[in-house]
Image (cartoon, coloured by chain):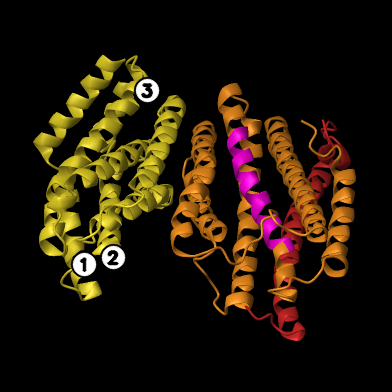
Chain colours: A yellow, B orange, C red
Amino acid sequence: MIRAARAILRKDLRLELRTKESVPAMTLFTVVVFVLFHFGLDRNSLDGSLASGVLWVTLLLAAIIGVTRLFAAEREQGGIDALLLAPVDRTALFLAKAAALFLFLVAVEIVALPAFALLLLGPDLLEALPELLAIVLLADLGLAAVGALVSALAVETRARELIVPLLLLPLLVPVLIGAAHATEPLLRGSQRPEDLGRWLGLLSLYDVVFVLLSVAVFDFLLED
Amino acid sequence: MAYARGLKPLAAATAVTMTAALALVFFYAPLDADQGFVQKIFYVHVPMAIVALCGWVAAGVMAIRHLRTGDRSWDVRSYVAIHLSVILGVGVLATGSIWARASWGHWWVWDEPVLVSFLVVFLLYCVYYPLRFSIEDPDRQARYSSVFAIAAGAFVPLNFVAVRLAESFTHPRVLSQTGGDLPGEMRLTFLVSLLAMTLLFVTLWKLELTSKHAEARLKRLRRRLEAREPAAVA
Amino acid sequence: MPALPLDEAGKYVAGAYVVFFALVLVYVAIIGSKIARIARAVEALQGDPSGDTPRADQLVEDE
């Protein structure tokens, strides 16, 4: 099963590297939204909870793009039927898609975080980097699991572009709460993180619940 | 499945309990020291919220049953439970808003973690309808709806915990008194109200299931007649 | 948190309970009319010569 998952993952990564559709779009989107926030908030620099909120809401919105496109390749080329006919474990499919989404998100954040620091952030980002990485990775894990689940749920519906954001965003509220509250003291410039453990704990709980749940129910999706 | 059996006694029990609850609310429960008469909204708002949330979680359990057994009737039960909880959800948000206005002067407050968490969950379940009805194949529709119901059902407690954690940092809880330190008379009134709301939910749930069941039978009937005499069907 | 005077508070409380009852009544009315419509449709079909249509009350009761 792991081999099958890796194979699908490799295919998806190679496809993305070749077509460069999702990741550049998501990255560009985050940068554009940062600029929008500059104009919308009429601020040159943000810190604290405002910075944290802008960063995480933007990342969540960018995730929508990735989620909507997660099964796009299969859909467009009729590959999904091929996948389903082959004796591929649905769990392998889920793991591969979630891993792909996770890697896409990390790729986006590699550009988006420095961009954010450059454009909008007041305090220095580097000081907070280790804790920030932990938060980002845990949040990305939840994003990836829920994103893969929502993407699969929406794969058959006619109104995919509408359903994905509407489903994804409420489900991600706990991730937003955990990530934003954890990041906020890091972006205040002077203080050390408070209660980081509490928010990391929330993110971890969310990740565990949704990874397990998605693995359990994925068998019932994409099945014919 | 005989949905209609027991519907009449259930409806009667609901009516009796609701009347009792109303009587208790307005003639037995003492006035709240802080909020005065406005606090009476608590007895309709909170039971509605609790029943709606439980309805959604129960729908998730029914969905698990559906996926496990392949019996589509469980998906219908799940759908009706979600549907009813959404209707109650509208009531929760409306009464919550009225309560906020009466207590705080604003039509919405972010200080109440239960209300805020409820809003997020409500918005999520609103997406159930477009998701469900945009899938044409009935078998797939049932399966995907059930997956949603399970994911959303698991989400309900998670979200509640998350919002609670968030709000506990900024604002102390002001509006709610969820039974922890309620004086005896209030607690009794609250419990009876909760019971009434639960009975109401179950009654309406059975009622709608009866209606759907009848509709399905009518369709089957029509189809049989159509096969027999194409001209005779109305 | 000063409590509102009884007459003012009464409006809000009444409003909340009215919202609740209105929701329930509208819902019951909709379901009730649906069931009535189904019963009528079954009666209409009963004028059918094929004779194996169940009676309306059998349809709604149970199986």
Q: Position of residue B120 (x, y in %)?
A: 49, 55
Q: Is residue C4 above or below residue A114?
A: below
Q: Is residue B234 visible?
A: no
Extent of the magenta region: B43-62
Dot 2: within a 10 Å radius of its alpha carbon, few (fewer than 14), some, or many (20 or more) residues?
Answer: some
- Image quarter hosting the N terminus of chain A: top left
Q: First in sequence: mark 2 or mark 3?
A: 2
Magenta span has A175?
Answer: no
Q: Is residue B207 above or below residue B117?
A: above
Q: Position of residue A72 (x, y in %)?
A: 26, 38
Amino acid type for the residue under numbered disc 2: Leu
Front residue of C2 and A175: C2
Left or right for C5, reference B132: right
Residue beneath disc 2: A50
Choose mark 1 or mark 3, whichever is in front. 1
Chain under numbered label 1: A
Cα–Cα span, label 1 and label 3: 42 Å
Q: Is residue B218 above or below residue B36?
A: above
Dot 3: within a 10 Å radius of its alpha carbon, few (fewer than 14), some, or many (20 or more) residues?
Answer: some
By secondary structure, the bulk of the magenta-drawn segment is best described as: helix
Cα–Cα span, label 2 and label 1: 6 Å
The numbered dot on residue A46 is 1
Q: Position of residue C61 (x, y in %)?
A: 85, 38
Choose mark 2 or mark 3, whichever is in front. 2
Q: Quadrant of residue B62?
A: top right
The numbered dot on residue B91 is none
Q: Are marks 2 and 1 in contact (CB under 8 Å)?
A: yes
SS category of the residue bearing label 2: helix
Amino acid type for the residue under numbered disc 1: Leu
Residue beneath disc 3: A91
Q: First in sequence: mark 1 or mark 3?
A: 1
Chain under numbered label 2: A
